[in-house]
């Protein structure tokens, strides 16, 4: 590590003398040197004790009742959320905790850098599971972003719970069993400095039909195991912890009026949101004008000018674009005399020379930069009504594809010309057979385009 140049002396002075050096930070009502609680994958200490001092947080339990609330309110400024296990499927929290094998939890949790993940140190070198391809990934927990390790213990003692040097998650089976991810979640919130916690989705009831607020089945044995843990939490652990919580000013509220956990007082979800965000004030309408003035000049800028007097707002005025009105304009070519078909006869054949096509073009004028594709409007006369036998040889186009037939208005005909988007090729002349009896008396029709 190289020494910096031009260090800010005020920062250095505040760091050294604002309180006794190396005194630590507060986790209770007094200052003391804190024990390392959080670690990197390599075992380095991450001192997060009291980082969110005095804050409020919602602990998102996984009971189905959670989705009865307007969860979008959890995204309001100032609202902090803490999730457990696969609960982030419903709502992505700011913090998250697990105690079981990492392969049981969503890939999108592990790989999401926005979620601070508190996990047991024993899970750091385990691989995660891809719930899309349904196979193990070659990625270890310690390689995922924003992962914070902690150490556990498996002997619950109420008067040690808030202050012991590792984090308790219940009792080992040798001490009666009853372990839950809810216990380390509450302890971590306390260590981080939160002093008001709202329980959301804390139902403490489960059956094979009533499991979680996300899609997951539970066998009868798993249901019985969870119900046994709920009983220990509501009848033993939390009643013993409540006096120690109160002594430290650590308030816990339950937002579910029908919860099986009755130790903590109830508060409605809406009231909890108001309490948790009240310190921020009216964020949507808060004032910024005059905030950059010097502290000694704040009084001068106390009375805010009306918006029409603020020159700085002119750069924020954006002219609204005028609506584009599309007008269809029909443009037709000047009428010209329609030349008649010229018939050239020879001794053995008769050739029909077609006049050049003079199309009628329909143009929709919207934007000059957009190219316009002409549409050919065919004209018909009664003389176009060919005999079926005579026209049978010309019933296909040059590529051998049958043309789209369209009946004419007025007198029905047996053949109609195809309307195409591009100018069509001149019609192939009618060439009758070379036998005299078929050509004798033949009068080719006159065609007008």
Image: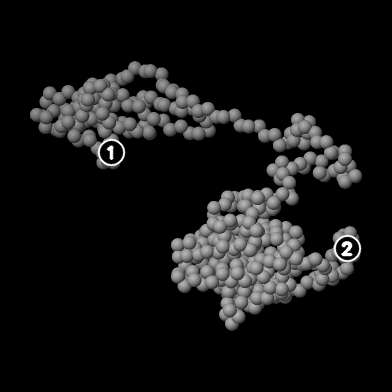
| Quarter where residue 447 is shown | top left
Quadrant assignment for the C terminus: top left
Q: Residue drawn 52% across and 64% down?
A: 205
Crowd around label 1: few <14 · some 14–19 · many ≥20 (10 Å): few
Front-most of residues 175 and 418? 175
At mark 2, the secondary structure is: loop
Q: Position of residue 443 (x, y in %)?
A: 17, 23
Q: How many marks?
A: 2
Q: Residue furthest bottom?
A: 174
Frontmost residue, 401 versus 199: 199
Toward which corner of the image does residue 330 lie, by quadrant?
top left
Dot 1: element: loop
At x 17%, y 31%, the residue is 388
What residue is disc 1 on?
Answer: 398
Q: Is residue 311 visible?
A: no
Q: Position of residue 355 (x, y in %)?
A: 31, 25
Identify the image quadrant of the N terminus.
Answer: bottom right
Q: Nearer the viewer, residue 64 or 408?
A: 64
- In the picture of the structure, the residue carrying the numbered disc 2 is 18
Residue 414 in sight from this viewpoint = yes
Q: Residue at x 70, y 34 (%)?
A: 317
């Amino acid at each position: 590590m190289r020494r910096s140049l031009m260090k800010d002396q005020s920062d250095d002075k505040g760091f050294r003398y604002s309180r006794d050096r190396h005194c630590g930070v507060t986790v209770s009502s007094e200052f003391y040197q804190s024990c390392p609680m959080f670690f990197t994958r390599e075992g380095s200490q991450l001192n997060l004790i009291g980082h969110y001092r005095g804050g409020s947080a919602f602990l998102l339990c996984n009971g189905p009742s959670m989705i009865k609330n307007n969860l979008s309110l959890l995204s309001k400024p100032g609202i902090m959320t803490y999730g457990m296990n696969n609960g982030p499927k419903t709502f992505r929290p700011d913090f998250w905790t697990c105690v079981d094998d990492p392969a049981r939890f969503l890939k999108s949790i592990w790989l999401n850098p926005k979620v601070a993940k508190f996990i047991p140190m024993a899970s750091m070198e385990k691989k995660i599971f891809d719930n899309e391809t349904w196979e193990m990934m070659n990625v270890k927990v310690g390689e995922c972003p924003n992962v914070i390790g902690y150490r556990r213990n498996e002997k619950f003692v109420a008067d040690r719970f808030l202050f012991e040097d590792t984090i308790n998650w219940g009792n080992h089976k040798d001490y009666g069993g009853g372990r839950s991810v809810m216990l380390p979640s509450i302890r971590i919130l306390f260590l981080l400095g939160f002093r008001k916690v709202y329980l959301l989705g804390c139902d403490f009831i489960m059956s094979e039909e009533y499991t979680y607020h996300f899609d997951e089945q539970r066998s009868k044995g798993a249901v019985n195991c969870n119900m046994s843990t709920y009983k220990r939490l509501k009848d033993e652990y939390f009643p013993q912890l409540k006096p120690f919580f109160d002594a430290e000013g650590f308030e816990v509220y339950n937002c579910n009026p029908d919860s099986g956990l009755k130790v903590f007082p109830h508060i409605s979800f809406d009231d909890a949101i108001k309490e948790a965000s009240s310190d921020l004030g009216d964020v949507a309408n808060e004032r910024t004008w005059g905030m950059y003035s010097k502290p000694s000049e704040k009084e001068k800028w106390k009375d805010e000018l009306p918006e029409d007097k603020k020159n700085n707002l002119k750069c924020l005025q954006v002219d609204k674009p005028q609506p584009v009105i599309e007008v269809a304009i029909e443009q037709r070519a000047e009428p010209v005399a329609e030349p008649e078909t010229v018939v050239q006869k020879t001794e053995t054949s008769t050739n029909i020379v077609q006049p050049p096509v003079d199309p009628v073009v329909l143009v929709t004028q919207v934007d000059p930069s957009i190219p316009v594709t002409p549409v050919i409007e065919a004209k018909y006369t009664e003389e176009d009504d060919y005999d079926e036998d005579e026209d049978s040889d010309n019933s296909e186009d040059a590529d051998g594809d049958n043309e789209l037939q369209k009946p004419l208005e007025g007198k029905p005909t047996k053949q109609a010309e195809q309307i195409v988007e591009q100018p069509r090729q001149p019609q192939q002349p009618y060439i009758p057979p070379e036998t005299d009896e078929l050509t004798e008396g033949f009068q080719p029709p006159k065609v007008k385009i």
